[in-house]
Image: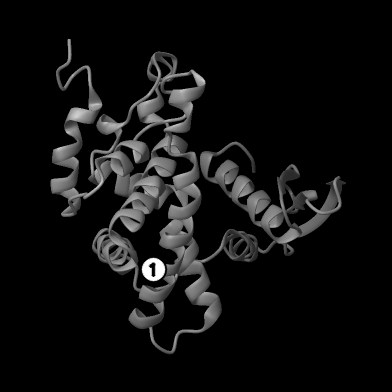
Amino acid sequence: MNDIASDPSLRLPALQERLAYFFKSHRLLLEAVTHSSFQGDGVGRRLCNERMEFVGDRVLGLVIANLLFRRFPGEEVGALARRHAAAVRREALVEIAEHLELAACLRLSRGEEEAGGRRNPGLLADAAEALIAAIYLDGGFDAAKEVIERLGRELIERDASPPKDAKTVLQEWAQGRGLPLPIYRETERSEPPHAPLFRVEVVVEGLPPVDATGPSKRIAERAAAELLLLKVHAGNVG
């Protein structure tokens, strides 16, 4: 039965209405909403949004950086960087995807559908990036910039103060309780040398150590701090 319930691509005209952008190339839009699981044969797999995610991430990053630079004149680079990280992180992309009702438009395999793919935050964030890339490839940078600024402005304006990174929040949490500063220690570094993976452990007095990995020590430290904060807030430690 080829109706809207069984064919998500039939929802694409409504998606374009919500975007306030209408594609010249229907194929680009179709590719943006096609997950790699859809049509498992070699021919079908070529029409998927994986490559578009790569482009969309870069376009999004540039537009948000430019928007922040103009919106917060005089703000120091560290604060701008924290605002930028918050505006392009997965949670922000998922919020945009939900606003656009993008999940209902995705083309997924039966297996991915049954596994709850339409509710998968990573899949939704990737699709939002792919959609940005499709707009850029279809209409150019100015078209993508207009859509991103319209969708992202509310996220940027939501907090007057720049968000703090996880290491700062964890440090302030410890100091507020009279505890020593958190200690970060690299515990492992995997090969290959040109693309190492770092494992870092964070220790706060009175709490079990927590570790995390990342492509750099700084990223691994942030990830470990975020994980420990999640455990603290969930009441799993302390």
Residue that appears at 46% across and 47% down: 53
Front residue of 126/171: it is: 126
Colour scheme in use: one colour
- Taking the spot 49% from the left edge, 62% from the top edge, the residue there is 85
The tally of labels here is: 1
Left or right position of 65 against 155: right
- Residue 230's image quarter? top right
User: Can residue 163 be seen in the rendering of this structure?
Assistant: no
Residue 67 position (above or below residue 220): below
Q: Is residue 90 visible?
A: yes
Identify the residue position indicated by label 1 in the image: 63
Give whichever of 152, 41 is nearer the camera: 41
Q: Find residue 29 and report its horizontal and vertical position in percent.
A: 29, 42
- Which sits in the foreground, 65 or 78? 65
Task: Return the residue nearer the eye: 182 or 70.
Answer: 70
Going 16% across and 22% down the picture, which residue do you hit? Answer: 4
Q: Residue furthest top?
A: 1
Q: Residues within 10 Å of mark 1 (few under 14, many from 20)?
A: some
Q: Position of residue 164 (x, y in %)?
A: 51, 66
Answer with left or right where residue 187 lies relative to residue 130.
Answer: right
Q: The C terminus lies in which quarter of the figure?
A: top right
Where is the N terminus found, in terms of image quarters? top left
In percent of width and height, residue 124 lies at 39, 38
104 up-or-down from 91: above or below: above
**Residue at the image position 40 percent from the left and 68 percent from the top:** 64
- Helix or strand or loop: what does disc 1 sit on? helix
Amino acid of disc 1: Val
The x and y percentages for residue 97 are 31, 44
Name the outermost residue toward the bottom: 74
**Left or right of residue 198: residue 140:** left
